Amino acid sequence: MKKWILLLASLPLACSKEANDQSITPAPQITMTSSFDLLQDKLLTPSCASSGCHLSNKDASFPQHGLVLTKGSSYANLVGVASVNPVALKNSVLRVRKYASGESLFYHKLNWDLSHHGLANYGTPMPLGGKPLSKGVLAFVQKWIDAGAPMTGSVVDASLLDDTTPSYVEDANFAPLASPVEEGKTGVQLKVDRFVIPPNFERELFIRRPLSNSAPIYVSRIKLKSRANSHHMVLYDFRSKSTLPALDDVRDLRNLDNSLNIATVIQMSNHIFLGGGTDPNSDYTFPAGIALQLPANASIDLNPHYFNKTTGNLYGENYVNLYTVPADQVKKIVQMIDFNVTSFNLPANQTTTIVRDFKFDKPVAVVSLTSHYHARGKLFQIKIKGGTRDGEVIYENTDWAHPKVINYDTPILLQAGEGLTSVATYVNDTAKNIGFGLTSEDEMDIIFGYYYER
């Protein structure tokens, strides 16, 4: 009997101890991934921080955008930072402006619907060579920015990322560019017909199109429209008309094994820049009363360049509108700048800067400038030669493959005897000397642009 009493007396004590043990067990800690870390893991790392794009400052495209988006670097490179994009700079649009997705280039570049940007054209949508973001990811980006773009903390519902509906369906949305005639204006439309960009391939091609003009025409405006993933669209004339490629033949710069098509490379040495550039959806109008004259029976070499970093086929397609005006409305005819350095030497295993002066024998107004050199070119500057602005840098490019084109809202006025200086810096990392030549293993040093006599 005493044993039972002792046992019963001990039971409440045991239960009490178990209850105490449960009460002091710590609650499990729930770790919530921050909205920015989700953005990094779901978008930036897999789609942006890839080789050739935004992986490091060694990427071929880095001189063009100056943006690295790897984990640990991306936040400081995005939030509150000015972009090198000229339209964004002009509009005071930062890469990411806290609480303002509409003033954030990052959001605009990820939105493939060009109508979203209103009158502003921020260039090629991203990711270049990829697919448009899902509606969920795009909404996540917008809400993160509008919540202040914090580096830590969860400020956006992560379930948005589950919506995989494409934010843009290009085949349904891409529409031909209305021709000048359809707009009730005068002019000519040229087209690069729809073509395939194979998986994991960078396709750049040339095709010479006739203008079918029986008399000279005067072009006052050039408008371009391209499919997504187009990196540039350039228009070229030819120095020599005796060695023209066949009309309407598609000439690829790269073979399918990614080797260069040497015949195409050699034909490129005959080019003179006419228009376009790294913005494949640009719209440029010459100053009032100024026009580019093209002779009767002219032809233009069209040069689109596309990327495909997906595992399926993508497509390219380009339109060019040349708007014309009657001859009696033209006060000044634009002439081409083709300042070409054809004699120089780049010693083996050295960095060399070539400086050349070019002068005009009449007063001129420069309205556009671009540059041309090859893979060993690291910096191309154009300076004013002579006058009160002597030595002023008016053009600078560090991306040899995609040279910047600057159209000057205020023409650069030069007097007779004044001109331009090309300052081109090359790094010859080979064991042989390099000079001027037509292949990719040689080098060039050319200023292209437009001017008119005053």
Image (cartoon, helix red, strand yellow):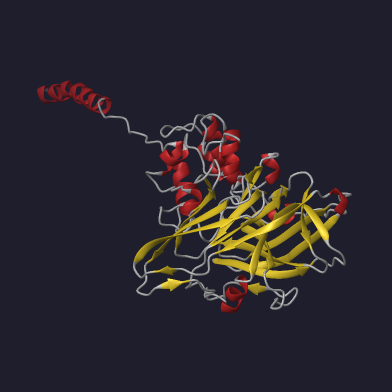
- Residue at x 70% of width, y 76% of height: 244
Of 287 and 153, which appears nearest the observer? Answer: 287
Relative horizontal placement of residue 242, taking residue 197 as reference (left or right): right
Does 30 appear above or below 47? above
Front residue of this view, candidates 357 and 318: 357
| Residue at 71% over, 47% down | 454
Q: Where is residue 120, by image quadrant?
A: top right
At x 56%, y 75%, the residue is 256
Image quarter hosting the N terminus:
top left
Is residue 418 toward the left or the right of residue 78 in the image?
right
Q: Is residue 327 above or below residue 311?
A: above
Q: Provide residue 129's location: percent of width, then percent of height.
A: 57, 58
Closer to the camera in the image, 38 or 151: 151
316 sits left or right of 7 in the view: right
Q: Is residue 131 visible?
A: no
Q: Quadrant of residue 411?
A: top right
The answer to whether residue 59 of the structure is visible from this angle is: yes
